[in-house]
Amino acid sequence: MSDVLKTFRIGEVEIDFPVLLAPLAGYSDLPFRQVCRKLGAPFCATEMMLDRCLLVKPRKPQYISRTDDEDHPIAGQIVGNEPATMAAAAELMDRRGFDVIDLNFACPVRKALRRRRGGHIMSDPQLAIDITRAVITAAPNRPVTLKLRRAFYESDDTHDAFWRIAEGAFDAGAAAICVHGRSVEARYSGPSDWDFLASVKQRFAEKTIVGSGDVMNAPAAMDMFDQTGVDAVSVARGGLGNPWFFRQWCDLRAGRDMYIPTLAEQKEVILDHFRRTVEFYGERRGVKNMRKFGIKYASMHPTPKKLRMAFVAGKDASDWLAVLDNFYS
Ligand SMILES: Cc1cc2nc3c(=O)[nH]c(=O)nc-3n(C[C@H](O)[C@H](O)[C@H](O)COP(=O)(O)O)c2cc1C
């Protein structure tokens, strides 16, 4: 990478440049991470993994926690609500070689909130700090990071809970926090509050702050750096259907025109993603899984609606390959 790209660190973990693939439930599995890494992603995260599930069969990793020798540096994200169970899961992740352990205190999905985990923890700062301390003690050699939202309640303009959790986590030795500028209550509605991200960076000038929310394309990532001063940005929905995102950001950062993949290259990458996914999950599950990725890839195609419908209609691998041939030749 050119020297205009600043190396970035989370604790002792060195990362080529500060644009990170976010945890994405249902998407950021090993095949998708492999595709992103081939196209330049310097750091990826798993989707959130329930602490108790990880501990059920510690020797037989489930699909969501599988990784390989090339899939580094990587953050394994865990979710749960008991310090001891989260600590046991973190210890397991340490043994399995995850470079960073990330704690999900941000998930706004109803099921997570009902079970008092994910975003629910934003409403209980002491529990957030207790979990963070327990995890840092259990995995002292791995940087521990937190995924937070700006608040639990949409009306919370003081952000008291946020500040308490962030202060407590850094005091406990957390290596970084990733801040999504929406409240848990807002889920994905309304804009991510980038002014809040700027205030977090101002308050913790010496700490590592990662920004999240509304980084839908590489120019938006450039804007987030400029407007907030965060140390890194986390790419979520903007990377779905566009694994070229990382390369595009590097282009802009280096003052070049942003790379736009040709249809032929899109086909090659989608095919590679498809083959990896089918190999990983088997044909049935793999084809089903690729449907949602196909819908995302379609947005770059000149006839996205037709292509989306064709991807959704595909029942088996041969249907899928035929759609690729028809639309990308
Ligand atoms: C489908 C989907 C799944 C997500 N899964 C996770 C997850 O497992 N863990 C997590 O911390 N955030 C998760 N997020 C939140 C993203 O990491 C990110 O913070 C959020 O989408 C805001 O960024 P964006 O507006 O640039 O997409 C998910 C988001 C989406 C859309």
Image (tube, rainbow, N blue to C red):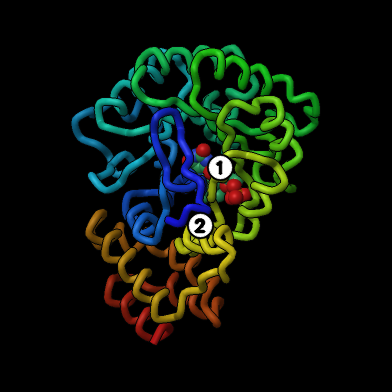
| CA neighbours of label 2 inside 10 A, class few (<14), some (14 to 19), many (20+) | many
Q: Looking at the image, which is closer to me, 5 or 46?
A: 5
Say above or below: 180 vs 305.
Answer: above
Question: In 3D space, how far apart are the residues under numbered discs 1 and 2 (Cα atoms)?
Answer: 15 Å
Q: Looking at the image, which is closer to me, 310 or 35?
A: 35
Secondary structure of the residue carrying tag 1 is strand
Q: Looking at the image, which is closer to me, 48 or 53?
A: 48
Image position, residue 291 (x, y; %): 41, 64
Count of number-bearing discs: 2
Residue occupying the far left of the picture: 59
Q: Quadrant of ligand 1?
A: top right
Image position, residue 35 (x, y; %): 36, 59
Question: The N terminus lies in which quarter of the figure?
Answer: bottom left
Image position, residue 270 (x, y; %): 37, 69
**Does residue 208 appear left or right of residue 85 in this picture?**
right
Q: Residue at x 63, y 46 (%)?
A: 213
Q: Amino acid at mark 2?
A: Gly
**Does residue 69 appear left or right of residue 213 in this picture?**
left
* Residue bearing mark 2: 239
Q: Residue at x 65, y 28 (%)?
A: 205
Secondary structure of the residue carrying tag 2 is helix
* Residue bearing mark 1: 232
Image position, residue 296 (x, y; %): 50, 65
Can the viewer see residue 99? yes
Question: The C terminus lies in which quarter of the figure?
Answer: bottom left
